[in-house]
Amino acid sequence: MLKTKQVLNSLETQILKFVHLKDYKSAEVYIKKENSVLKFDKCADWLLSKLVLKPQVEKIFNKKHIYCVWDLLLTKPLRNEHYTQITPIIHAKDYACIQGTVVSKKAGNPYTIVIDDGYGRLDCKWFNLNQFLKHILKNIKVGSHVVCEGKITEFGLFKEMHHPRIKASSQFKPHIEVIYPSFGNLKNTTIKKIIEQHLLLSPNPPYDYLPYTIIARNNLPFLSEVFEALHVKSAFDEKIEKRLKYDELFLMQLGLALQEAYKANEPISIEFDEDFLQKIEKKLPFELTIDQKKAINTILNDMHYAKTSSRLLQGDVGSGKTIVALICALAVLKNNYQVCIMSPTTSLAEQTFTVAKKFLEDEGFNVGLLVSTTKKKNEIYQAVKDFKIHCLIGTHALLNEKLEFSNLGFLVIDEQHRFGVDQRKILSSKGKSAYMLIMSATPIPRSLAFAIYGKTKIVEIRSMPKNRKAVHTIHLYKKSEDKAFLHAREEILKKHQVYIVFALIEESQSKVDFDSLMGSYEDIKNKYFGEFKCAFLHSNIKSAQKEKIFHDFVHGKIDCLMSTTVIEVGIDNPNATVIIIENAENYGLAQLHQLRGRVGRSDLDSFCYLITKDRISSLAKRRIDVLLSTNDGFEIAKQDLILRGSGEIYSTRQHGLPDLEFADILNDRELLEKAQSDIYELLSLKYPLSNGLIKMVEHKWQKKFSFARVI
Ligand code: ADP
Ligand code: MG
C-alpha cells in the first residue's frame, strides 16, 4: 500500500507540473499510468455491478433503493458495538462483554440464565426462542464458564442482558460488532455477510473511481480505505465522512456541469440605444423602482457584453419581476431574436401572456401562448419555427420536442423553484446561445443557489413599487373569525375583492381536523356573502373551468373567491384587498408569505387575516409572529431557515438534484465550493474524465432521479 502511494505521489507531482505548464499531452500519458494503478474503470464497473443475491433478499434491498455494489457499500452502520475486553458486571453498561459462571438456568419464556463473575450477577434473558437457540442454550450447563455479549439493561441494582450472544469462555475473541440498519427481517449477521461477500469481489486496493488529482489535493482517503473503515475496521471518522460527502457533492456537481457543458455555444450579444430604457419607461403606467432599473441594466449589460449567459432574478412577491423580464425581452426582440417565457401554471402563463401582448404587440412583435390545453399546437410550432411568433409564453407544454425556435435569444423561467434542473435543461436546449433569466420569489440560501446555478450570478430586487403599502396582518383565533368575514364584507362593499383560503378540499381528505373548502363554502357564503358573487376553486376542478374562474375574478366578476392554495403562485389581481387564511397554523412561513402576497398589489390598503385554532403549537405561533412583524420576503426566508433548519426546507430533490445522504447543502458549503471549483478546473483543463467516473455520475443522477414535476 505504502509503495503504491509513493508511486502515486510522484505521478501526482508530474501531472500537476505538466498541467501547470499546460502540457496536457504529457499529463495525459501520466494520467493513463495513474489509471492503471488505481483501476478507475474497473472500480466503477465493480461498484455499479448488480448485487449477487437470492431473489427474495434482493427484493428487500431494492425496496431500500439498493441495487448495486456502490449502493450497498454506502450503507452506513448504525453503530459499532465494542466487545474488545471483558468487563466486570458491576461496571458494565451499554454494550459489554461479561465473563462468568452459570449459576442457574430456567427454561420458559423468557429463558433465563444467571451468570456470576465474582463481582455481581447478570440475568441473561431470551424471549420467544427459536428451536436452534433453544438447542444451544440447552447445552450450556450450570457451572460452565461462558462469555455473554450484548446490551446491558439496568433495573435499579439489577442488570440484565436480553438476547445476548453466549459462548464458551475459551471461544471469546475481542472484536467489534458492526450493526447495520434493519433490512426487512434479515439478521445483522446476514447483512454483514452480504457486505463482506461483495467486498471480496473488489479490485485490489487501493482502488478508486475519482481522478487521483482530486483525491490528492483534497487529502481524501481512497475508496478502498472508506469501505474498509466502514465495514471492516469500524473506524468511521471525519476523514471518511468528508470523502463520502465530497463524493456526493462532486458527482452531483459534475452531473450539472456536464449537462451544461454542451451549452458551451457563444452567448448572444445584443445592441440597444442608450436611451432605450428611458423611452420604454415613458410608455409604462408606472415608474420603475430603482432596483427594477438596476436589474434591467444588469441583464442588458450581460447580454450586450455576452460574457454571462444566465442570471437569477430574485425579488419578493409583487416586486415587479414580470416587467423587468418583458423590458429585457423587448431589447432582445429588437435584435431579431425570439423570446420564450415559461411559467409554472396555466393561469400564470395566461396572465403573463396578457401583459406581454399589450406591451410587445404595440412594438410590432407577435406574442403566442402555448399551454397544455392550447388547441392547434402544430400551428403554433410552425409559426415559432417560421419566426412569425416572436415571443412565446407557456407552461411545461413548451418542453415538447416538436417546439423548435428559429432563433431563440432569451429564455425566461418564472418561479423557477417549481421547475427542476432537467426541465431547465430541456428548455435551454431549444436555444443553445440563448441568455437564460431565472426568476424566483423565494430567496434561497447562497449555497443552495450555488449548488443549483453554479456560476450563475444573482440580481435582486429589494425595493417594492412606490405605491405599495405593507399588508396589515392580523392573527385571529377561530372563535373570533367573524371579525375577518365582516371586514371582508365591508371591503366588497367598497368594490374590492376577497380571497379565503382553505387547507383541504373536502372534510374526509385526511384525519387532520381542518376546515375544508367544500365543507365551509355554503355556510360562509350564506352567512356573510349572500348578496355577493362567490366562487370556489380547487385543484380537482377542470382546467378550463379553473381558468374561467381566475379570469372572472381578475376581471371583477367574482367578489369572493374561496379556494385551496391553488391561488398561491403569482396570481395578480391588484383589486383584491383581503385574504383570509383558515388554519394558518398549517402552513410554512414561505407559503404564508406567498399567500399574503396575493393582496397588497396596488395603492389600496390591504389585509391578511391569519385564522388559527384556539390552541396552536409554539412553533406555529412563532411563524405567525414573524409574519405579523415583517413584510420583507428576504427577512422571512431568513427566519424560516432559523425556525425549520436547512434540511427540511431545502431538499435537493425539490430542485431536481439527486438526493444527498451524507452531505448537507447548507452546512457543507465549503466542501461544495471545493468540489465545484475542482470540477471547473478539470473541465477547463480538458482533463480526460475516465469512463468509470462518467458512469458513476450517470448512476448518481439516475438513482431516485425523478423527472422533476411541478410540486
Ligand atoms: P412579481 O415580482 O411577484 O412577479 P409582478 O411582476 O406580477 O410581481 O408585479 C406585480 C404587480 O405590480 C403588477 O400588477 C405590475 O404591473 C405592478 N408593478 C410592477 N412594477 C411596478 C412599479 N414599479 N410600480 C407600480 N406597480 C408596478
Ligand atoms: Mg411573478
Image (tube, rainbow, N blue to C red):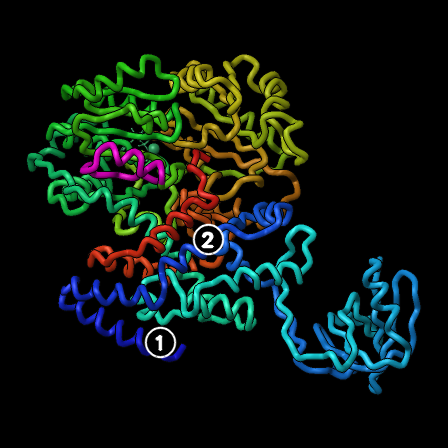
| Distance CA(mark 2)–CA(mark 1) | 30 Å
Residue closest to the eye, 92 or 285: 92
Residue 439 coordinates in the image, percent (x, y): 31, 38
Query: How dense is the environment of label 1, judged by Cα within 10 Å: few (below 14), some, or many (20 and up)?
Result: few
When asked about the image quadrant of residue 300, the answer is top left
User: What's the residue type where badge 1 is placed?
Assistant: Lys
> Does the Cβ of the disc 1 residue fall within 8 Å of ligand 2?
no
- Looking at this rendering, what residue extends furthest in the bottom direction? 118
When asked about the image quadrant of residue 656, the answer is top left
Residue at image coords 28%, 42%: 313
Q: Give the residue pinned by disc 1.
A: 5
Residue closest to the eye, 688 or 303: 688
Image quadrant of ligand 1 equals top left
Which SS class for mark 1?
A: helix
Residue 46 coordinates in the image, percent (x, y): 44, 57
Q: Is residue 454 left or right of residue 549?
A: left
Which SS class for mark 2?
A: loop
Asked if residue 563 can be seen in this view, the reply is yes
User: What's the residue type where badge 2 is placed?
Assistant: Leu
State which region is magenta: 422-441
Asked if residue 620 can be seen in this view, the reply is no
**Does 416 sit above or below residue 618?**
above
Pointer 2 or 1: first along the chain: 1
Residue 660, numbered circle: 2
Q: Nearer the viewer, mark 2 or mark 1?
A: 1
Q: Quadrant of the N terminus?
A: bottom left
Q: Does the segment drawn in magenta span residue 425?
A: yes
Residue 323 coordinates in the image, percent (x, y): 25, 31
Residue 594, numbered circle: none
Q: Is residue 645 left or right of residue 431?
A: right
Image label count: 2
Residue 641 coordinates in the image, percent (x, y): 46, 52
